[in-house]
Amino acid sequence: MTEKLQKARDYEALHRPEIANQLPAFHLTGGVGWINDPNGFAPYKDEYHLFFQYYPYDTQWGPMHWGHAKTKDFIRWEFLPAALAPDAQYDSSGCFSGGAATLPDGRHLLLYTGVEIRPEGEFQTQCVAIGDGVNYEKYEGNPVITAADIPEGSSARDFRDPKIWQENGVYYAVTVNRGKDGSGDVLLYESPDGLHWQFSSILYSCGYRFGSMWECPDFFHLDSKDILIHSVMEMRATTLEYHNGNCKMYHIGHTDAEKHFHAEVSHAMENGLDFYAPQTLEALDGRRIMIGWMQAWEGSKQKIPGMGFMGQMTVPRELTLRDGRLLQWPVRELESYRANKVEYRNVTIQEETALPGITGKVMDLILEIAPTETPYTRFTLEINRGDGFHTDIILFPQKGTIRLDRTFSGHPHDVNHIREFPADFHNGAIRLRLLLDRYSAELFVGDGEQAASMVLYAPEKADGITLRSDAAVQVSMEKYDLEITENWRTNHGK
Ligand code: FRU
C-alpha cells in the first residue's frame, strides 16, 4: 500500500470516531471530511458497494481519493477503509468519478478517471484498479482509455466519469467528454475483459441544448426503454423544471443499430436545492436503484462551522417508468425501520396547527391533502421549526408548483435557499412523502413523479412541524420514527 493511501486510512480511523455522534441517522457521509459524487455503486458478492469522491482531511474539496462503504439493505452502511488515493503519475491530481463491476474471476474492478496536470495542461484518462472488496491495486496497464480513444476534435482535458456495466459477456462504459463544439458528449466504449477498451460511438450529444459540459453519465435499460442520465454544467433555466447552473437530467429513449441514443422525452432528475451526480445499479432482485450526492456544488464552497463532515448521499431510490416519466421512491427496505406510527385521518386544517405526536427530525412522514371544493391557494408545511428556525414547503395548487424555502433553516451562508418547481395537483389533492434526517429533508411528490432534496442546518431542538392553509383543507398524515441502529460501523482495513 502506498504512503498516501495508508495516510488516508490512518486519518479516517483516527478521526471518524470523533464525529460519529454528528452523523445523520441513515444518510451516508464520508464519516469525516468531504465527499461529492457517488462512485462504483454496484453489487459485489451479495452486498452493495458504494465509493465516493473523498477528501478526508478537510470539509472542502481537495485532491480526490475514493472513500468506501457497503450495505446489504441500502439503509445500514458499513464504512470500509479508503480505496484509492491519488498516488500514481496518471492520477496525481485526483482519482475522479467512475464505476465498478465484477470480473469473471470474482475480483472487483474499479474504472475511474485519473487526472494529471502536466506543464502543457490537464489530462483526464480512464484507469483501472482491481481488488477484493477492501484493498485495490492499480492496474499496471493504466491508463486504459486515453485521448487516443476519443473522436477527432474532442477534449483530452474534459473526459471523465466512466460508468461501467456488463451485458451478455461484454463490458460497456459511458463517459462524458467535451465534444468538438465545446459542449458535452456521452461516449460509449466496449471491452471483452474490463481492461482493453475500444471506442464504440458518440452515444448522445448536448449541442448546447442542455447547458454546456456534462458530467457523470449513466445508461441502462428499464422496461423496453433506454435511459440516459447525466449532470449538466451551466444550465440555463427556461422553465421552473430546470434551474441555472449545475443541473441533472434524464432522457427516455432508444438506441439505434449504430449505437446512437435518441431521446423521446427529457426531464430534470430532481427539483431540490441539493442533488447532483446520481448513479444507479441493478439490484440483485432486478430493481434499478439510484443514489445521488445530496449537495449542490454552488452551496458547498464554504464550511459549515462546527461540522466535521461535508456532503451526504440521498437515500437510495427505486426507479420505475410510468407514462413517460421516471418515478423515484425511497428503497422499500427503509419501511422495515419504521416505528411508533402516529396517524391522523381527514383533519381540517386552516389556522396554524401542530398535531400532537408529529414532531422530530428523523422520520418518514406521509401527508395527503384531499380534493377540495373551495380551493386553497397556499398550504404551508413547516419543518425543523423552533427557536426562530423553520423550513417551509409551500404548495400552490392553482399555479401547480411547490416551493422549498430554507431561508430560516440556520444555514450560515448566502447560497440559494429557495426553489420552486412544477407538481401535479388534482383539484387541490396531493400526496407527499417526506424523509427527515438530522440535516436534510427529501420530498417525494405523488408516486415519485418529483423528488426534491435539501440540506438543513437548524439545531437539534428545532424539531417542530406545523401546517396551515389559506382555506380549510382535509389533511391525513402518517408519521413513523426511523430506528436505525448499528450504522457507521468501521473496519478501517482490519
Ligand atoms: C461532478 C464532478 C465529476 C468529477 C468529480 C471530481 O461533481 O465534477 O465530473 O469526476 O466531480 O470530484
Image: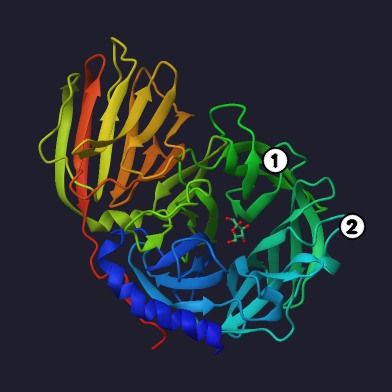
Count neighbours of disc 2 (C-alpha within 10 A) and say few if under 14, some if 14 to 19, many if 20 or more.
few
Q: Amino acid at mark 2?
A: Glu
Could you tell me residue 241's position as x and y percent? 54, 31
Q: Quadrant of ligand 1?
A: bottom right
Q: Is residue 384 left or right of residue 13?
A: left
Quarter of the image with the N terminus is bottom right
Q: Which residue is mark 2?
A: 152
Count neighbours of disc 1 (C-alpha within 10 A) and say few if under 14, some if 14 to 19, many if 20 or more.
some
Quarter of the image with the C terminus is bottom left
Q: Is residue 379 left or right of residue 153?
A: left
N-terminal label among 2 and 1:
2
Q: Is residue 374 visible?
A: yes
Q: Looking at the image, which residue sits at the far right?
A: 152
Q: Which residue is at 36% across, 65% downward?
A: 73
Cα separation between marks 2 and 1: 24 Å
Q: Secondary structure at mark 1?
A: strand
Disc number placed over residue 263 in the picture, else none: 1
